[in-house]
Amino acid sequence: MESTTTEILHDFLHLMRVYKDGRIERLEGNDVVPASVDPITGVQSKDVEIAPEIGVGARLYLPANADQQHKLPVLVYFHGGGFMVQNPFSQTYATHLNALVSQANIVVVSVDYRLAPEHPLPVGYEDSWVAIKWVVSHFKGDGQEPWLKDHVDFQRVFFGGDSAGGNIAHNMAIRVGSEKLDGINILGLILNHPFFWGEEPIGNEDAETNYPDKAFVDRLWRFVNPLTVGSDDPMLNPAKNPDLPSLGCSKVLICVAEEDLLRDRGWYYYEVLDKSGWKGKVEIMETKGENHVFHLYNPTSESAVAMVKKVATFFNQHKD
């Protein structure tokens, strides 16, 4: 009989394996690179504790020559990884955010939220809200972080993220729309290959050639959120959320990739939001011939460079 130390209970491809003896093996995003000054872009980074009692922190990024500039927009960023892997201190996110901060000339707060299954959803959402409230506390002068107090224009606040982080960013903007945020308005939302889904397949989601397939995504969602009502949970399927017209920002940029299983959900979000009665402006960019979060795994490719440039332009459109 096979030992329980090697018998797999849950297998989520390149993300995670859970063994019958309770052992959890994360298959990516375990590395940590120190905060530093990036030698290529001159972008500075440092790590901060936000709520150490629950383990919520962030990595902050500041563009070169920030001391010589007017106050800058701030992006509160949520990393991807299916709510179960990755971290804001990995080389993957350091590379991406150094490039974005340099091109867009913004401050970034990359949030370290707790991961499933040790901390199943909605913990990740609640941790993200704690981080947002911490950022906004600096608007009233109560915060202690000098990079936020000295360099951020709190009239230009953005949320963003990739994959599961895009899902979090969207849901945080929904929460801002319903609860408000200490007088702060969220200017824009950037969703890179956002993790949205639904019970009924749309587009190419039920094609037999898909890898992973729809059943995999349904199973992953129930794993990270055991109390969910299913794949039509409003946190996962924005079309089922009656609060969608109250999305708490004025502009949304969605990035999708042609070969991504989540592509059609990105387009569906674009269409549903545009017709929902929401008063803002939504735009979408599709990258041909690329797959899910390609810009993270091949950041110097022509497609990745073009995508970062598009996102940087989105910030610049809102400058005075």
Image (tube, rainbow, N blue to C red):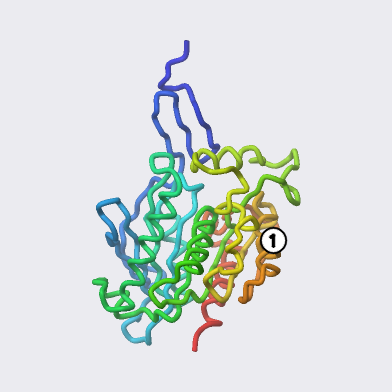
Residue 6 in which image quadrant? top left
Measuring from the top left, give residue 290's x and y in whole percent. Answer: 65, 56
Identified at 57% across, 43% down, the residue is: 229
* Percent of width and height locating residue 296: 52, 56
Question: Which of these two is toward me, 32 or 59?
Answer: 59
**Image location (x, y in percent) of residue 177:** 51, 69
Relative vertical location of residue 81 with respect to residue 209 in this rendering, above or below: below
**Quadrant of the image occupied by residue 305:** bottom right
Residue 182 versus residue 37: which sits nearer the camera? 182
The residue wearing badge 1 is: 267
Query: Mark 1 belongs to which amino acid?
Result: Trp
Q: Residues within 10 Å of mark 1 (few under 14, many from 20)?
A: some
Residue 159 as seen in the image, left or right of residue 113: right
Q: Residue furthest top?
A: 1
Q: Is residue 213 above or below residue 176?
A: above
Q: Relative to 152, is 128 above or below? A: above
Q: Secondary structure at mark 1?
A: helix
Q: Is residue 316 left or right of residue 24?
A: right
Q: Residue at x 40, y 28 (%)?
A: 22
User: How far from the left and from the top, in percent, is residue 121?
Assistant: 45, 47
Count the numbered circles shown.
1
Q: Residue at x 39, y 81 (%)?
A: 153
Q: Quadrant of residue 88?
A: bottom left
Q: Is residue 189 left or right of residue 55?
A: right
State the residue in front, 287 or 187.
Answer: 187
